[in-house]
Image (cartoon, helix red, strand yellow):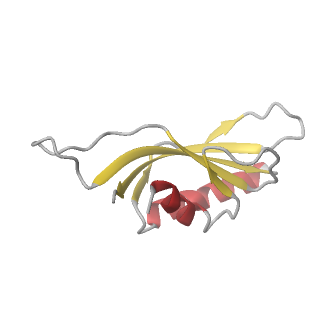
Amino acid sequence: MTLEEKMYAVVSSVVHQCFPVKGPFAIHAPVAIWERLGGTPIYFMDNTAADKSHVIVRVIFFETTAIKAATTMKEIEKAMVSTDVFLSSPRTEPVTIADENPDGFYILAQDFNVWFTTN
């Protein structure tokens, strides 16, 4: 399974509309999008690659109210850290992202350390 498939399995258990990198042009809340922000390559002392990879993943969540956004982001965090699909820990607390549209979404973003098996 790729990281994208693993992320979908975890995040879709909380939010049914979830996409890697970007969603469709016209979206209706709630929706989650995740993106890779890099990570730390893992190699052994003999320069062979480990069977696990580390990546920093940012989950961005869009909702119609601030309370729903905060509550659902906490559910996403719990799903990320409790799954057995990969190992994960929060890297940051959720951060509010301003939406310039007055009728826009409440947007929260949170970064996670994710370690997963590469096949």
Q: Residue at x 20, y 43 (%)?
A: 43
Q: Is residue 74 left or right of residue 46?
A: right
Q: Quadrant of the N terminus?
A: bottom left
Instruction: From the top left corner, tell me how far across and down residue 69 is, in percent.
Output: 71, 52
Q: Is residue 47 left or right of residue 64?
A: left
Q: Is residue 91 left or right of residue 41?
A: right
Is 55 placed above or below 85 here? Answer: above
Q: Is residue 88 left or right of residue 35?
A: left
Is 94 placed above or below 3 here? Answer: above
Instruction: From the top left corner, tell me how far across and down residue 26 is, in percent.
Output: 82, 47
Instruction: From the top left corner, tell me how far across and down residue 61 is, in percent.
Output: 67, 49
Q: Residue at x 15, y 41 (%)?
A: 47
Q: Residue at x 70, y 48 (%)?
A: 23
Q: Quadrant of the C terminus?
A: bottom left
| Outermost left residue | 46
Is 2 placed above or below 21 here? Answer: below
